[in-house]
Image (cartoon, helix red, strand yellow):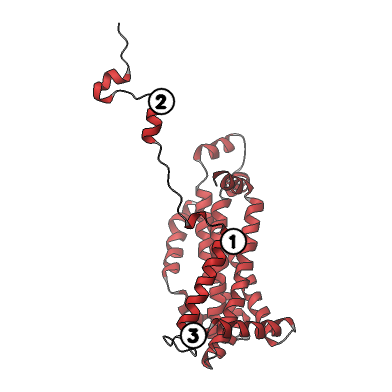
Amino acid sequence: MTDITPSDALGPSHAVLPTEDRRSDTVWTETTSFADRIPKPIAILLLGVIILVVWHLAATVGVVSTIILPTPLQTANELVVVGTNLLTGGYMLGALWITFLEVLLGFLLATVIGVTLGVIVGETSFGERAVMPYLVALDTMPKIAFAPLFVAWLGFGIESKLALATFMATFPIIVGTAAGIMSAERNAVMLFRTMGATRWQALTMMKIPTGLPHIFTGLKIASLAVMAGAITAEFLGGGKGFGELIRVSASQLDTARVFAFIIYLSLVGVLMYGTVRLAERRLVFWQSSKSRSTE
């Protein structure tokens, strides 16, 4: 019997090309643009300079009043004033410490509550069918609208700010934890149970470690949301934190100082996010190695 090759079966018009011809016919290379060839530090510096130039022109040519949009130089002066107050232990340092406590404690509480509810939703049918619909309904509500309720329930102290910060940061952790637990392969779970592992051992020794990348995704989102919750609560409920200083400065049209406060608050946010990112690199080291290998 005569052997039939794939090219014979497809006919003359579909003859199999030699290996080199197929490679040249299928491989596609992308031309790197000039912007992509700029080194990362220079690109960051260049973009920053462009932003400052546009900002300065917008504030000085009369398009926007400097009362509403201060110049970069005015903002830099206020950064020095606020920074000096912080370094010398002035009242701004006390306000920043209160806001930092609200953010830190809110994040820790959100982590405990979010991981617990995420495990319930991801591990049990009751959680997925009964608890999750209520959580989704709760998350679709405008969370800022709860601020007056928290003030009424908990007063004007740190407790109401802590409650709103926790409230705004919890849901991303729930979703990340539930998704991480559900991402465990069914065959791997069955093999684990077949080897004699209990349900608790399968959860703590296999499902949660496997789902850590999803859990840390939720934690990183929460580390940013908790700052928004704390500052929003200080805007609406008063207090002694940085949010109250921003509100007072804005009411006095001291926008340069408002910008300075916002920049210092962003450093707190960067610190929170960087800490979570560092913990992720330590605990989910295989994910970091995989990312580096694909770069």
Image coordinates for residue 84, horizontal then vertical, percent? 70, 84
Taking 242 as reference, is 200 above or below it?
above
The residue at which mark 2 appears reads as 19
Residue at horizontal 63 percent and vertical 45 percent from the top: 205
On residue 41, which mark appears? 1
* Amino acid at pointer 3: Leu
Q: Secondary structure at mark 1?
A: helix
**Farthest top residue?**
1
Residue at horizontal 70 percent and vertical 82 percent from the top: 86
* Amino acid at pointer 2: Thr
Q: Earlier in the sequence, mark 3 or mark 1?
A: 1
On residue 69, which mark appears? 3
- Residues at marks 1 and 2, CA–CA distance in whole angstroms: 42 Å
Taking 171 as reference, is 264 above or below it?
below
Image coordinates for residue 99, horizontal then vertical, percent? 63, 78
- Residues at marks 3 and 1, CA–CA distance in whole angstroms: 28 Å
Q: Quadrant of residue 80?
A: bottom right
Residue at horizontal 61 percent and vertical 59 percent from the top: 277
How many labels were placed on the picture?
3
Taking 88 as reference, is 182 above or below it?
above
- Residues at marks 3 and 2, CA–CA distance in whole angstroms: 63 Å
**Farthest bottom residue?**
252
**Which is in the foreground here, disc 3 or disc 2?**
2
